[in-house]
Image: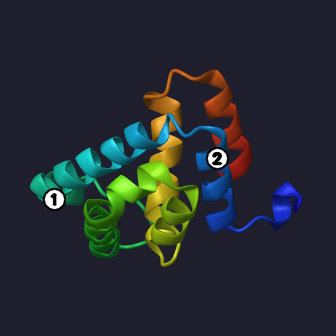
């Protein structure tokens, strides 16, 4: 196995899925719910957008693309770490997904080991 600093985003996502498969359905559900809320309330999000890292419109496009990927491959993503990582970490959606995984771990997950691994892998 590679050392932590050598892992790609896709490899980190796959490892996370392999270690915590029970968290994946909840992560995908949270990401989907956020994408829907983001779409529904986009003007509210736009007004409060303060990220200098990327434009609101680009973040919105990543959210829409991610929602489509989950809709198309969600069932298989729950079952397979390879599908999960290959689909969500193939394009720049990886930026959006990583952000949502970190936020899920910080706010929604009750599993302390999961939270620690997410911090170690993605921050």
| Residue drawn 28% across the image and 74% down it | 61
Number of other residues with Cα within 10 Å of mark 2, as a class: few under 14, some 14 to 19, many 20 or more: some
- Judged left or right of residue 92, residue 61 is left
Q: Is residue 51 above or below residue 115?
A: below
Of marks 1 and 2, which one's residue comes earlier in the chain? 2
User: How far from the left and from the top, in percent, is residue 87?
Assistant: 46, 70
| Residue drawn 34% across the image and 54% down it | 75
Query: Residue 20 bears which disc, if any?
Result: none
| Residue closest to the eye, 18 or 58 | 18
User: How far from the left and from the top, in percent, is residue 41?
Assistant: 13, 52
User: How far from the left and from the top, in percent, is residue 122?
Assistant: 65, 52
* SS under mark 2: helix
Q: Quadrant of the N terminus?
A: bottom right
Query: Residue 18 bears which disc, if any?
Result: 2
| Residue drawn 64% across the image and 47% down it | 18
Rounded to the nearest angstrom, the CA distance separating label 1 from label 2 is 31 Å
Q: Quadrant of residue 116?
A: top right
- Judged left or right of residue 101, residue 122 is right
Q: Which residue is mark 1?
A: 39
User: How far from the left and from the top, in percent, is residue 69?
Assistant: 33, 68
- Judged left or right of residue 87, residue 70 is left
Number of other residues with Cα within 10 Å of mark 1, as a class: few under 14, some 14 to 19, many 20 or more: some
Q: Residue furthest toward the bottom? A: 91
* SS under mark 1: helix
| Residue closest to the eye, 66 or 87 | 87
Q: Quadrant of residue 77?
A: bottom left
């Amino acid at each position: 196995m590679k050392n932590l600093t050598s892992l790609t985003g896709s490899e980190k996502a796959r490892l996370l899925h392999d270690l915590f498969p029970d968290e994946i359905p909840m992560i995908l559900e949270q990401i989907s719910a956020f994408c829907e809320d983001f779409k529904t309330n986009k003007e509210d999000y736009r007004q409060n957008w303060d990220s200098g890292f990327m434009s609101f419109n680009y973040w919105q496009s990543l959210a829409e693309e991610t929602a489509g990927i989950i809709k198309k491959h969600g069932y298989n993503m729950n079952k397979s770490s390879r599908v999960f990582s290959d689909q969500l970490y193939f394009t720049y959606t990886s930026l959006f997904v990583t952000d949502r995984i970190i936020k899920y771990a910080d706010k929604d997950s009750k599993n302390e080991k999961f939270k620690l691994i997410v911090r170690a892998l993605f921050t």
